[in-house]
Each structure stands twice: as C-alpha cells, then as structure tokens.
Image (cartoon, rainbow, N blue to C red):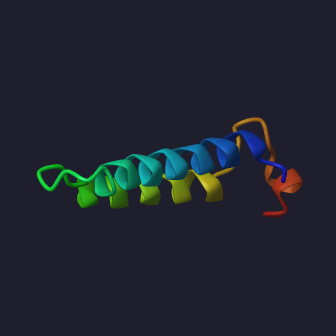
C-alpha cells in the first residue's frame, strides 16, 4: 500500500457515510431517513480517494511507469 494516506482517508469517508446512514435507518423513528444521495456521493468520493495516489508517491513507486 504505497498511497496509504489517501487509502485510509477514503476508507474513513466510506465508513462514516455508511455508519451515519445506518444510524438513521435503524433508529426506530419513521420520520428520519438517510439521505441516500449524500451517502452515494460520499462512498463515490471515498472510492476516488482509495484509487488516488499520495502527493509524495512518484509514478515509479506507484507502479504507473
């Protein structure tokens, strides 16, 4: 894992989005619902971070060249 900073940040983003949605979904109150559009956007952003490369990682270190 050469770009560990962006990978950890991406995983944290995904976990926070899913955890927040699950809390609202299972809180037993019918008037509270997760904003699924925001959850999907956050998960997509997290995936983008997972596949991104840290600024201090060269293309050679990342295996791109």
**Residue at x-position 48% and y-position 44%:** 16
Considering every residue shown, the one lying at the far left of the view is 31
Relative depth, front residue between 60 and 22 = 22
Residue most toward the right? 61
Residue 30 sits in quarter: bottom left
For the residue pair 15 and 62, the one nearer the viewer reads as: 15
Q: Is residue 1 left or right of residue 17?
A: right
Q: Residue furthest front?
A: 28
Q: Residue at x 87, y 55 (%)?
A: 60
Q: Residue furthest top?
A: 56
| Total numbered labels | 0
Residue 28 in the figure: left or right of residue 5? left
Coordinates of residue 17 in the picture (x, y in percent): 43, 49
| Nearer the observer, 50 or 30 | 30
Q: Nearer the viewer, residue 39 or 7?
A: 39
What quarter of the picture does the C terminus occupy? bottom right
Which residue is rendered at x = 68% and y = 49% of the image? 7
**Left or right for 12, reference 35:** right
Q: Tell whether 60 sits left or right of 14.
A: right
Report the residue at 19% width, 51% height from top. 29
Q: What x and y, as percent, mark residue 12?
A: 58, 44
Reply above or below: 52 against 40.
above
Q: Position of residue 20 (x, y in %)?
A: 39, 46
């Amino acid at each position: 894992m050469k770009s560990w900073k962006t990978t950890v940040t991406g995983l944290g983003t995904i976990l926070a989005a899913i955890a927040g949605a699950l809390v609202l979904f299972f809180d037993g109150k019918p008037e509270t619902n997760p904003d699924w559009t925001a959850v999907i956007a956050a998960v997509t952003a997290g995936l983008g971070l997972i596949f991104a490369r840290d600024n201090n990682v060269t293309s050679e270190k990342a295996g791109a060249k």
